[in-house]
Image (spheres, helix red, strand yellow):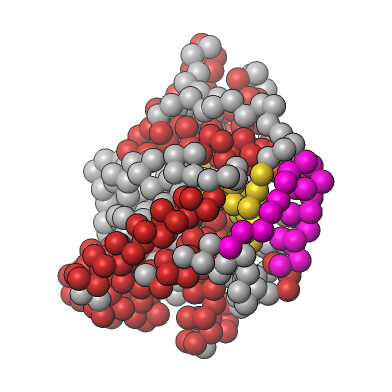
Amino acid sequence: MQDWLGKSAADLGRAIGAGEVNPVDLAKAFFERIEGHALRDRVYARLTKDRAMAEARAASERAKAGQRLSVLDGVPISWKDLFDTAGDGTEAGSKLLTGRVPDRDAVVVQNATAAGLVCLGKTHMSELAFSGLGYNPSTATPPCVNDADAVPGGSSSGAAASVAFGLAPAAIGSDTGGSVRIPSAWNDLVGLKTTHGRLSLEGCVPLSLKFDTVGPLTRTVEDAALLMAAMEGRVSGDLRGASLKGRRFAALKTVVLDDIRDAPRAAYENAVERLCAAGAVVETLEVPELEEAMAQAGPLMPGEVYGLWRDVIEAQPEAMYAEILQRFRLGKEFSAPDYNAAWAKLDAVRQAWDMAVAPYDAVLAPSAPILPPNLERLNSDSEYYKTENLLALRNTRVGNLMGICALTLPTGVPSSGIMLMGFRDGEQALLRLGVAAEEALS
């Protein structure tokens, strides 16, 4: 059974369907690995063993009866600790929510369960999901698979670690400014940011209702497609026959290459060359209006998140990590007119973006302009924390501000991903491009 623990979710699902793997044995094997792993308490906030074993037994009976619910029926996954699971703590990485136990599952959890997926447990995360670094002194900081002294990326930090360290076949996280894609990129995984509104946020602890999205962190693009479909309550689209030949990509220059470090730049440039070798046509693109969008991120995100969390935070501010508290309180600087004016400006930039990228199949950029920062220095150097956090989130934030879907893929260089940005509700086309790009980059 140990040989199966490094397989993709799709491969495990197919093995269950072929009678090669029993879901009960698979769940037991993952729990044995988790419980015997030295870093388990930095990855999982809590395990849901009773639930998982009951779900695995039901999946096993369905497989024997030839009544499987989906390709992934019986496959275990982890969930970021902001998705409600009935009867289990859901605390969003914050002492402010200690003891919070919901009485029902989030809608995406309900849908995934209806597809037969097995819930292993809840993973650690940045406090209230408001950091791209994954550093959380309030609860736990998960490890980075490529650097024991670095952070893993956030805010879906434990989600990425659970897959990268072989403690789950796949994970579900959320992405408000890059929180699926940054930890995926820094841990050499596939990460899908879905279009805002595509997957239900009901039962998810919110950060920004205008920008929050749900997305999978996986080993393969196929897994990402299957998990998105499961959470949406539908069957995944067909990814077979995807090719890069004749596909047109725009290599974005505006903003995303500013202050980029040498290693991510070299990895990105090499990845673009390999896409071209596989038949893609890549042209450089400037979208100067993006500078205006970035300037509006301040009034838009902190303004909203402080409005959502103000009363909870100010009732117990000493319970929060100081850097996160300070970031929330930035929202006090912006008025309602500031917020509404920022949205008007962002809407205008989105129109300019749509026109600029319309001739292309997708837009390319480095997933992150930096490598995972040093954990100890983040703890001791406030300015370093702020600088690295903003840089970590900068490139991925383009997709959130533009309201589109986006996919990060490993390049083969540790902690250096390449991002493909698609169109609003264009996940199927993006995933097909992603499968072809994945093959070219492997």
Task: Read off the magenta span.
Answer: 265-286
Nearer to us in this view, 173 or 27: 173
Percent position (x, y) of residue 243?
Answer: 71, 34
Tell me if residue 257 comes above or below residue 41 in the rendering.
below
Instruction: Quarter of the image for the N terminus: give it.
Output: top right
Nearer to us in this view, 116 or 430: 430
Residue at 35%, 44% in the rendered image = 197
- Left or right of 291? Residue 258 is right
Quarter of the rendering containing residue 293: bottom left
Q: Is residue 53 magenta?
A: no
Percent position (x, y) of residue 351?
Answer: 41, 53
Residue at 79%, 42% in the rendered image = 278
Residue sticking out furthest to the top: 65
Tell me if residue 397 comes above or below residue 149 in the rendering.
above
Q: Is residue 359 visible?
A: yes
Q: Is residue 281 magenta?
A: yes
- Left or right of 373? Residue 297 is left
Q: Is residue 52 visible?
A: no
Tell me if residue 436 comes above or below residue 337 in the rendering.
above
Percent position (x, y) of residue 91?
Answer: 33, 59
- Left or right of 322? Residue 163 is right
- Left or right of 263? Residue 399 is left
Residue at 47%, 87% in the rendered image = 382
Quarter of the rendering containing residue 221: top right
Nearer to us in this view, 199 or 336: 336
Residue at 41%, 55% in the rendered image = 350
